[in-house]
Image (spheres, rainbow, N blue to C red):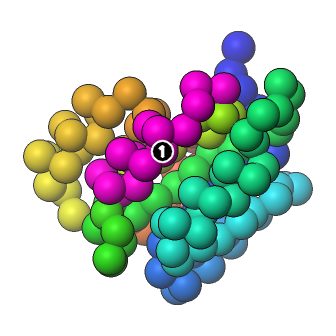
Amino acid sequence: MKKKFPRFIIIDNEVNALVLSQAIRTAIAPAEIRTFNCPEAALKYIVLEYSGKKKADYAMLFMDIDLYPVTIWEFLEKFEELDHKTRSFVSIVALSFSCDLHNKERAFTNKHVKNYLEKPLTTEVIEQMFL
């Protein structure tokens, strides 16, 4: 059974976060969407929202691979330090404008990354993720 994701977390620059938020709202309504351009702030949100909880709404986290100054790889190292239960509420999707095969392979070898998608994400791509 697929998890239901009533909550979405986006870590990207403001413009890309806005575009992705609109696509999510069009494809999956209603949805709670939190956007961050700072990965550290998103990590703090995850800790506050999910640490110590036995039950919570699942979240799908979209993050740009090359977000400056913290890349997804650095974020994943910090995410790994969270307790297992907290991490279990969050599924991570890596985003990139490039077709870099090295990044794609690296993303799929990380146990926390559930998908790798190329930007820009359209409503159709998001709908396909939930069929």
Give the side of residue 24 with respect to residue 36, left or right. Answer: right
Q: Is residue 104 magenta?
A: no
Residue farthest bottom in this picture: 15
Q: Secondary structure at mark 1?
A: helix
Whether residue 90 is visible here, answered yes or no, is yes
Residue 19 vertical position relative to residue 6 in the rendered view, above or below: below
Identify the residue at image location x=59%, y=69%. 41
Location of residue 80 in the rendering, given as x and y in whole percent from the top left corner = 44, 37
Name which residue type carries label 1.
Phe
Q: Is residue 75 magenta?
A: yes
Give the side of residue 25 with respect to residue 94, left or right. Answer: right
Residue 32 vertical position relative to residue 86 in the rendered view, above or below: below
Q: Quadrant of the N terminus?
A: top right
- Residue position marked by numbered label 1 in the rendering: 79
Task: Answer with the quarter of the image where residue 32 lies.
Answer: bottom right
The residue segment tinted magenta is 72-85
Q: Nearer the viewer, residue 35 or 98?
A: 35
